[in-house]
Image (tube, helix red, strand yellow):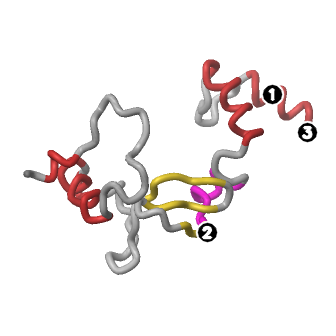
């Protein structure tokens, strides 16, 4: 079996349950489908790297079910934590309208500035 054969069923809507695949299985998959086996130049040292399964509040769960405090929080993008119900509701409302306009003036930023 090649590393590419480990890829999860594309029709599956969520990741495998923690423990279903090992960190090494995921690293093999990443090396088969991602340049350099990672996301850009950011990577944890091999001795401490892990694969995130999900985020909840200020914590991350790895694919083995272990929980870690997320001290990085998406470099500030997740400063309110992961999967916060109020943020989820606001995103659900905003997603159909667009979410990132990269510095271009838009109605939502004007409305927010007026409120602030």
Q: What residue is shown with label 1?
A: 110
Location of residue 86 in the rendering, given as x and y in whole percent from the top left corner: 77, 39
Mark 2 / mark 1, whichever is N-terminal: 2
Q: Quadrant of residue 9?
A: top left
Residue extending furthest right? 115
Q: Secondary structure at mark 1?
A: helix
Residue 110 left/right relative to 115? left
Residue extending furthest left? 1
Q: Nearer the viewer, mark 2 or mark 1?
A: 2
Give the magenta range.
70-79
Which is more toward the observer, 78 or 16? Answer: 16
Q: Nearer the viewer, mark 2 or mark 3?
A: 2
Give the alpha-carbon distance from disc 2 to disc 1, as whole Å.
35 Å
Q: Quadrant of residue 60?
A: bottom right
Mark 3 / mark 1, whichever is N-terminal: 1
At 26% from the left and 54% from the top, the residue drawn is 30
Q: What residue is shown with label 2?
A: 69
């Amino acid at each position: 079996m090649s590393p590419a054969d480990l890829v999860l069923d594309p029709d599956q809507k969520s990741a495998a349950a923690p423990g279903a695949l090992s960190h090494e299985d995921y690293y093999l998959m990443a090396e088969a489908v991602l340049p350099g086996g990672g996301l850009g130049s950011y990577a944890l040292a091999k001795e401490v790297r892990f694969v995130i399964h999900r985020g909840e509040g200020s914590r991350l769960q790895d694919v083995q079910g272990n929980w870690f405090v997320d001290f990085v929080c998406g470099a500030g993008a997740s400063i309110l934590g992961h999967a916060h119900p109020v943020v989820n509701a606001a995103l659900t409302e905003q997603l159909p309208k667009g979410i990132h306009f990269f510095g271009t003036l838009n109605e939502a930023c004007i409305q927010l500035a007026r409120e602030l």
